[in-house]
Image: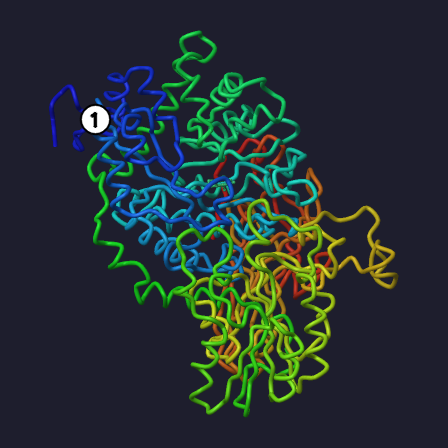
């Protein structure tokens, strides 16, 4: 590598900061602007001039604004390398950064993030992200726009599929794990490895609150809720070393996030200490005009640059106007330099200067590797939540099983939203997995895809057991795919009711990208199983759970309402000033209960697990101390169990009203039949703290309830609990920000 003093940025032995400074000093204004330009699908033939002029800093390989819902031709190492050759031929030889939305798998597809969240297992999420990065890197991708860490309270919003559910603590835990998986470890230390991608925490911030669940709609949010719920996962991602952050499409309190200087500069860069590049969402710089804050792209570029958006994803507003804005003094060159520095620093950290090219033979070696499929199968099983079971499951050998419904033979549809590179032909269907597994027991498996419900009913009559596989097509989920009704797609409940009338035994499997309102299925059939779009190994994963080869361990990362009109249903809502009389009506609605059909954290196993009383090692938590909270779990059934013990706290007295139930810990415990085990959580002030409107951590004291429970209660209720008196930490409001401890 050159050690030529004039091209010091090419020398890996020169400290990163100096490389960046040397490069910046050598750049023209136009070259600087080029680094802030992200172009969609550059083509070597048509765009070689732009690339060699240094006019493009990064490329997004995508099929369009609704990329998550439409497959595209994909990218290959040879394509990325050709682009790279053109970029390296530029005057300063700055490599191109190739980006793609690699969200929950690449060629091997894992469950949608909401399904991964059902595992409540950061190690699994980290492992899925690692394999995703390995496979995408082999196709020349270096930057992914994931994880999405928007806390989504409203399941009508299609993008609930892309995140980790409704709980800020769980989203923080799993989002940080995904960042580590993509980037090859904490703090971005593994970014330059051959199997790593730069991650991007998106969509900053509050997007999960889109009004009415309508995608892209406005958000109104108070500062305390913003701090404690929506910013929290971004803090965790920044603490995990996330390389980039994406500013969102929506407005917060009437200001588009892509022009939101206070939230981007003061909060993200200032309070959260984020030092990497901020990229706009797709065309979001241009959309500032539609939001009515600028008349044209010149105005939009001015606002976005001033607000702290470093990279303009595809609008072209920076490409066309940024240099003039600097020349006219409308945008300070120092501000532009900062943005460029951040992009260049990322390229250095990624090792792009040293290893700009992808190994063109690698994809064939790593895509769909057996260990990737094995992980996908384990992950798919973890995304299955057993909601109801009268004892029919796990399946026992019978003469004939009939499998019906659109998801019985579905392939691509099991992959879920934001699957750009997965292929239907790689997918194991539920019907095939059942055949494969039950043949050994001599069970005859018949199959139909439910296209003719009358024919399905005929086949059902002949079978000993019917498994009906219904649910949402992935095109009803994800970006721009909100729904007004959370019920099953039209006609499915009716078909199921017909099946229930003619089947000896009916098991219903609902495959979905969001929590649904399944009131009509409350008593229908013998068992109800929910599977979030499970990915390439979906059939195997679901059947592993149905047969009991894998104990059901999925838990709901969001509450499931009875009916759509109940949403949103946060388990961590505030106490009401007028609590319900326990002996009175079930809630405030005249026509329904206030409670969800299935609460957050809920999921059954094949054995009942009993919880003993919560024991605390002390009744008082003093400053600097830790109290241990423990409970004895007992597998009271005849099947192996994997229990997800959840630690909830409630602060009864604080400077703000605090939720009736806050999740602050999770442990997964395997229990053999009859086995007892003690589960212990360390409770310290970090777990009990909250943030004030300015984002300062408050370790306030007072009485707390500590619960260890199998799921979130209704009104703070389920599971055994104990009372803990907590001393405040001295100088709480001014305490140095020690971040969120997530484990
Ligand atoms: C989505 C982002 C995505 C981007 C690039 C946008 O429409 O909101 O989540 O990363 O497109 O494809």
Q: Quadrant of residue 231?
A: top right
Q: Residue at x 62, y 35 (%)?
A: 692
Q: Residue at x 63, y 48 (%)?
A: 482
Is residue 168 visible to the viewer in this orientation of the structure? yes
Q: Secondary structure at mark 1?
A: helix
Q: Residue at x 54, y 54 (%)?
A: 683
Q: Which residue is mark 1?
A: 9
Using the image, determine if residue 432 lies above or below residue 691: below
Q: Quadrant of residue 636?
A: bottom right
Q: Position of residue 358 (x, y in %)?
A: 23, 45
Mark 1 packing: few (<14 Cα in 10 Å), some, or many (20+)? Answer: many
Question: Is residue 272 found left or right of 37 in the rendered image?
Answer: right
Q: Residue at x 58, y 76 (%)?
A: 404
Using the image, determine if residue 353 lies above or below residue 438: above
Using the image, determine if residue 666 lies above or below residue 241: below
Nearer to the camera, 640 or 221: 221
Nearer to the camera, 259 or 266: 259
Is residue 731 visible to the viewer in this orientation of the structure? no
Q: Quadrant of the N terminus?
A: top left
Q: Position of residue 455 (x, y in %)?
A: 63, 79
């Amino acid at each position: 590598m050159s050690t030529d003093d004039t091209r010091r940025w090419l020398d890996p032995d020169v400290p990163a900061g100096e490389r960046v400074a040397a490069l910046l000093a050598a750049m023209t204004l136009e070259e600087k602007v080029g680094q802030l330009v992200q172009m969609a699908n550059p083509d070597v033939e048509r765009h070689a001039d732009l690339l060699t002029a240094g006019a493009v800093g990064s490329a997004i390989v995508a099929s369009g604004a609704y990329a998550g819902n439409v497959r595209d031709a994909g990218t290959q190492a040879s394509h990325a390398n050709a682009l790279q050759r053109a970029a390296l031929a530029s005057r300063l030889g700055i490599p191109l950064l190739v980006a793609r939305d690699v969200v929950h798998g690449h060629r091997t597809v894992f469950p949608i993030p909401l399904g991964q969240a059902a595992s409540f297992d950061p190690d699994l999420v980290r492992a899925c992200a690692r394999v995703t990065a390995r496979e995408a890197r082999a196709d020349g991708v270096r930057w992914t726009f994931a994880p999405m860490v928007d806390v989504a309270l409203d399941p009508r919003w299609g993008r609930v599929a892309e995140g980790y559910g409704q709980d800020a603590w769980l989203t923080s835990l799993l989002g940080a794990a995904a960042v580590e998986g993509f980037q090859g470890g904490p703090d971005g230390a593994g970014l330059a490895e051959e199997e790593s991608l730069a991650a991007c925490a998106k969509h900053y911030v509050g997007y999960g609150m889109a009004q009415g669940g309508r995608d892209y709609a406005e958000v109104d949010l108070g500062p305390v809720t913003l701090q404690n719920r929506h910013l929290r996962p971004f803090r965790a991602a920044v603490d995990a070393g996330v390389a980039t952050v994406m500013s969102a499409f929506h407005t917060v309190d009437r200001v588009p996030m892509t022009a939101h200087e206070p939230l981007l500069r003061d909060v993200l860069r200032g309070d959260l200490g984020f030092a990497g590049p901020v990229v706009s969402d797709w065309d979001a710089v241009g959309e500032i005009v539609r939001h009515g804050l600028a008349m044209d792209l010149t105005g939009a570029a001015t606002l976005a640059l001033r607000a702290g958006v470093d990279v303009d994803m595809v609008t072209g507003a920076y490409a066309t106007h940024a240099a003039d804005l600097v020349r006219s003094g409308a945008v300070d060159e120092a501000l532009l330099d900062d943005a460029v520095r951040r992009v260049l620093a990322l390229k250095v950290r990624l090792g792009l200067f040293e290893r700009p090219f992808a190994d063109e033979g690698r994809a064939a070696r790593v895509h769909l590797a057996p260990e990737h499929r094995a992980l996908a199968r384990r992950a798919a099983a973890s995304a299955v939540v057993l909601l109801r079971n009268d004892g029919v499951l796990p399946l026992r050998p019978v003469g004939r099983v009939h499998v019906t419904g659109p998801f019985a033979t579905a392939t691509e549809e099991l992959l879920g939203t934001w699957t750009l590179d997965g292929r239907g032909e790689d997918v194991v269907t539920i019907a095939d997995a059942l055949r494969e597994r039950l043949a050994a027991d001599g069970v005859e498996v018949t199959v139909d895809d439910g296209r003719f419900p009358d024919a399905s009913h005929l086949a059902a009559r002949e079978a000993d057991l019917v498994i009906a596989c219904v649910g949402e097509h992935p095109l009803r989920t994800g970006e721009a795919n909100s729904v007004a009704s959370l019920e099953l797609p039209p006609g499915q409940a009716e078909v199921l009711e017909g099946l229930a009338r003619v089947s000896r035994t009916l098991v219903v499997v609902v495959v979905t990208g969001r929590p649904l309102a399944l009131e009509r299925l409350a008593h229908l059939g013998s068992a109800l199983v929910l599977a979030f779009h499970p990915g390439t190994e979906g059939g195997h994963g679901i059947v592993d759970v149905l047969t009991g080869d894998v104990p059901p361990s999925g838990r709901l990362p969001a509450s499931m309402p009875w009916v759509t009109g109940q949403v949103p249903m946060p388990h961590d809502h505030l106490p009401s000033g007028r609590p319900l009389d326990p002996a009175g009506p079930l809630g405030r609605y005249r026509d329904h209960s206030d409670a969800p059909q299935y609460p957050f954290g809920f999921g059954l196993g094949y054995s009942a697990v009993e919880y003993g009383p919560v024991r605390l090692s002390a009744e008082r938590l003093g400053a600097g101390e830790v109290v241990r909270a423990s409970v004895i779990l007992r597998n009271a059934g005849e099947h192996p169990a994997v229990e997800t013990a959840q630690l909830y706290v409630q602060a009864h007295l604080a400077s703000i009203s605090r939720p009736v139930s806050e999740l602050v810990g999770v442990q997964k415990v395997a229990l053999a039949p009859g086995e007892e085990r003690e589960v212990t959580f360390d409770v310290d002030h970090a777990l009990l703290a909250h943030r004030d409107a300015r984002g300062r951590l408050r370790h306030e004291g007072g009485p707390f309830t500590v619960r260890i429970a199998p799921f979130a209660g209704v009104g703070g209720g389920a599971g055994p609990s104990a009372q803990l008196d907590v001393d405040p930490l001295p100088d709480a409001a001014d305490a140095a920000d020690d971040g969120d401890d997530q484990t």
